[in-house]
Image (cartoon, rainbow, N blue to C red):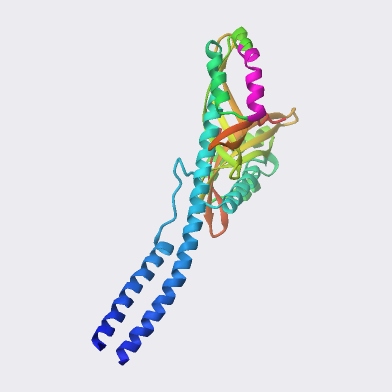
Amino acid sequence: MTARTTGVLAVCSLVLAGVVAGEAWYVWGVSDPTPTATRPVVVGDVASRSAVETAAQDAAAIFTVSWKDYDAHLDRAAALMTDSFAATYRTTAGPVRARVVSSRTRTTTRVAAAGVVRGSPDEVQALLFLDQRVVVGSGDPSYNARRALVTMVRTDRGWLVGNVQTG
Amino acid sequence: MTTTQRWLAALVALLLLLAVVGAAVARRTHEERSDASARAERYGAVLAAANAEATAFVNLRYGRAAQGIRAVAEGATGDFRSHYVRSARRLAATMQRQRSTLTGHVVSSGVVAVLPDRATVIVATSGTVSNRRTGGQEVPRHFRLRLTLLRDGGRWLTSGIAFVGDAA
């Protein structure tokens, strides 16, 4: 009887340990889903909205530039980006400086609309419609309607711009 | 009861408690994942419907205007659909007169807002237009569209299309 009781308790312990292990695996062992064509946004609404709003603010800041403070603008814009993209941005923006300064160009950008294209907990891609007002020298302003795909990356410093494609 | 049995009984009690708590946590996790999965699929369905409607909207050929208009109407609902169908004959006549051909494809699209029964999506398209004004030449034409969609009978249908206008 004593041996049988011990055996029953041991089996119960093993079964329950298995159940607890299974529950733990289900709660903590399943990796986060990744975006697919049919499930492009696998991050919560609050996080994706936060990323898209940050993308809109940052894009407006990055694409609003004046010849008067071009170098300071580069520093401000780079602070909104991941280190790797900031390096790329400085490389490509550098040659533009001479043209902007010599033509005394001022560009003001506002975001007309923004939406989430793809999203995971670590990375969100936003589609932005940008309205730009460009003044060259003392000439009349011209207006451009553009679009931008902005990739936001979650970092220790919050959402940062990881890539920008314009069209 | 022996000392071993007492230890085993205590272990069984502890594991039972953990299993009960674990079941509650697992159930909550399952519900959250189900909600997240449904939400993720909703984004996909909304974008697919908006892309299909925008594609139909920017592909109209004067020789096949009726088919093009029907394709737009099939993905539409409400006043937008009624208005579009009502003006179809006039639109087709104008396209025929101008020998207009509009072609395009979706470059990118993003969800502005989505609820279980309604959504707003922005769509960027790229393509060409040709008509008498262009001398029959294909001229690049890019659109920025805002679509509102309603869930109707298990389908996402467009209830409105607006151009997100040129900067001014």
Would you say residue B90 sits in the magenta stretch?
yes
**x and y, in percent, of residue B157 in the image:** 57, 33
Q: Main secondary structure of the magenta part?
A: helix
Whether A62 is among the magenta residues is no
| Residue B128 in sight | no
For residue A26, say whether it is visible.
Answer: yes
The region drawn magenta spans B78-92
Give how far across and how far down residue B51 sits, in percent. 53, 32
Residue at the image position 57 percent from the left and 19 percent from the top: B69
Looking at this view, is B147 or A63 the one in front?
A: B147
Q: Is residue B29 left or right of residue A47?
A: left
Q: Residue at x 66, y 18 (%)?
A: B86
Write down the quadrant of residue A56 in the picture: top right
Viewer-proximal residue, A41 or A4? Answer: A4
Q: Residue furthest bottom?
A: B2
Above or below — where is A81 with respect to A132? below
